[in-house]
Image: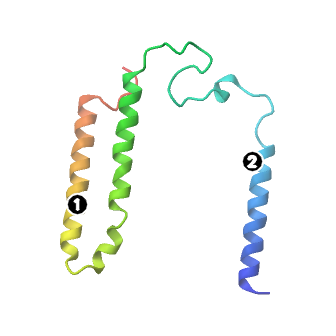
Amino acid sequence: MNLIVIMMIIASALSIVLALVAFWLPQMTPDYEKLSPYECGFDPLGSARLPFSLRFFLVAILFLLFDLEIALLLPLPWGDQLSSPLTTFSWASLVLILLTLGLIYEWMQGGLEWAE
């Protein structure tokens, strides 16, 4: 048989087996805590006029900020093909140092603590 056909059969069989296991494996008795969405930190069935948690907002913004570094550093492996790769790597190092200093500052200020 062709190697590509064998790989396609293995990938399809593995996908079907994993999908069936994921469908049948969970418990059939749902739990209220697991069913409630925790996207905004509120009880979805409660009042909509509750004050918003600033701590939740801060942690979400910090996650987006430090997750953005992946998008900034994604073209870095192609930087060695430029005429001056040292400049590209120095700018990338500067971005990483700046983000590391920001992380240390937030850590020291207690911005990463969820509960006080």
State the residue in front, 64 or 89. Answer: 64
In this view, 47 is above or below 111: above
How far from the left and from the top, in percent, is residue 96?
Answer: 26, 55
Callout 1 crowding tier (Cα within 10 Å): few <14, some 14–19, many ≥20: few
**Quadrant of the image occupied by residue 7:** bottom right
Residue for point 60% across, 29% down = 37
- Looking at the rendered image, the quarter that the C terminus falls into is top left
Q: Is 7 displayed left or right of 70 in the figure?
A: right
Say which amino acid is labelled 2.
Ala
In this view, 91 is above or below 35: below
Q: Is 85 displayed left or right of 40 in the figure?
A: left
**Quadrant of the image occupied by residue 103:** top left
Callout 2 crowding tier (Cα within 10 Å): few <14, some 14–19, many ≥20: few
- Looking at the rendered image, the quarter that the N terminus falls into is bottom right
* Colour theme: rainbow
Residue that numbered label 1 is attached to: 93
Residue for point 59% across, 14% down = 46
How far from the left and from the top, in percent, is residue 89?
Answer: 23, 68
Say which amino acid is labelled 1.
Ser
Residue for point 21% across, 45% down = 101
Residue at mark 1 to residue at mark 2: CA–CA distance: 42 Å
Mark count: 2
Q: Residue furthest front?
A: 49
Residue that numbered label 2 is attached to: 22
Residue for point 43% across, 15% down = 51
How far from the left and from the top, in percent, is residue 98?
Answer: 21, 50
Q: Is 70 displayed left or right of 87 in the figure?
A: right
Question: Which element is circle 2 on?
Answer: helix
How far from the left and from the top, in percent, is residue 99?
Answer: 26, 48
In this view, 64 is above or below 6: above
